Amino acid sequence: MLQKPRGTRDFLPDEMERRRLIEERMRAVARRWGYREVCTPNFEYLELFTMKSGEEIIQEMYVFEDKSGRQLTLRPEVTASVLRMYVNEGRVLPKPIRWCYFADCFRYERPQKGRYRQFWQFGVELIGADTALADAEVIMLADDLLHTSGVEFDLHVGHLAPMKHILRDLPPDDHRMVMAHLDRHDPQALGHALEAKGLGDRTELLLALSECREIDEVFEIAGDVPERPRIEETFTILDSQGIRYRPNFGIARGLDYYTGMVFEAFAPNLGAENQILGGGTYRLAYLFGGDDAASCGFAVGFDRIMVSIGDFPLEYEPVVGVVCTPEARTRALEIARAFRKTGIRTEVDLMQRSLSAQLSHAARTADYAVVVGQRECEAGTVTLKNLHTGEQRETTLDDAVAEVMRFGRC
Ligand code: HAM
């Protein structure tokens, strides 16, 4: 038996229906905030991702060459594609631009629960607004989106400026390495790395910063951070709107394009892979040949949200199985059409089975059987059988439709 590739999943209909329901809720929230959906290719030129993140990122991607020798990759995320699209098509649009997407992403990672090689992100990007309110809007939208999905979560909001201020004597290229240790919560490696650069005294400061939960204390630790007014303004807006979050200035974020505010959300009921959302402010447009537009966005790890909320009951939709004799087939198809027109799920026999075989199949797959034989054809009626109670009666088509529509509503 052939198996699916490692790190991928198949979704059966019940699971797909649950996923679509939550996906639609997320789309509706984004739309209410003015974010309109876009779609980009699921493969891109490799360069789009290596330009900012360097060649190391190739290890984590599905990279391939096409028949003309172009270096391509399946997208590991969508932000870079959206910003490329903004540079290609969106530069003339009035700013700020509010876009959202729901897309599958591919990362060549070691699979485990909550970490897949193909996974889905629901994300938003706000392009061309460089204010504390813009940062706050994206965080508030994330909060609304997560609440609406029904997941339980803790929201952490931070900013890279205090961390960068502590590291100001270190060349910017080395920041990335230090941030990676912080991101992995590895104090020992962090200490060794800073020691090697002659900045051992900063280790304690960085660790204190990542522990710190009070905004005033952040500036006592980090000193005179020029971005302080902007950071405070963002937090004041969030507080004024009753957003529940925890200041966390230890957030470093794995991707290397963030420039200022950063935020993450965690689901307490998940294991090691409990980060369900990540985002922040960044600048990418200039790299792709555009202006230096300030941007801010986030992506929700859709699959982790689904694991966290677990299986919930779906609204039950009644199913009708139309059962007929060979002579009544045309009438049976008309009847099926009438049921479907009102939105009822209706299936007809495709296997030319006997009436009794059709009925026993319907008993396993449907809530009602609608039986159409010669008598019903002549009388212009149908026989409606409730497959749960076994009750059956001959009636008009309209009445049968009305009864099925009432099913489950009482
Ligand atoms: P990210 O933190 O790399 O950020 O991914 C966002 C979310 O995707 C994570 O918080 C996690 O829930 C989910 N995720 C990541 N990798 C996997 C995986 N292998 N399996 C399942 N879920 C996964 C970004 O991708 C940025 N583009 C977010 C952003 C948008 N920043 C600004 N705008």
Image (cartoon, rainbow, N blue to C red):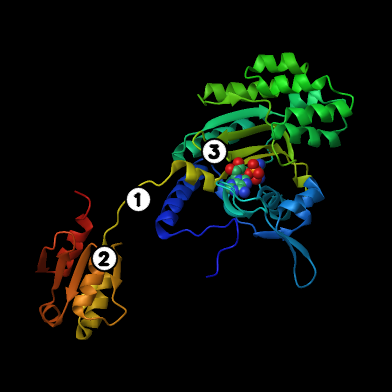
Distance, label 2 to label 1, CA atoms, is 19 Å
Indicate the secondary structure of the residue bearing disc 2: helix
Q: Give the image quarter of residue 234.
A: top right
Is 266 drawn above or below residue 123 in the view shown?
above
Asked whether 118 or 190 is in front, the reply is: 190
Amino acid type at image mark 3: Gly
Under circle 1, the secondary element is loop
The mark that comes first in sequence, 2 or 1, is: 1
Task: Determine contact: label 2, label 1, CB under 8 Å.
Answer: no
Residue indicated by mark 2? 364
Query: Which of the 4 image quarters holds residue 8?
Result: bottom right
Q: Position of residue 318 (x, y in %)?
A: 26, 59
Q: What x and y, as percent, mark residue 345?
A: 30, 64
Judge whether 49 appears above or below 361 on screen: above
What residue is disc 1 on?
314
Q: Tell which residue pokes out farthest to the front in this image.
A: 1
Residue 348, numbered circle: none
First in sequence: mark 3 vs mark 1: 3
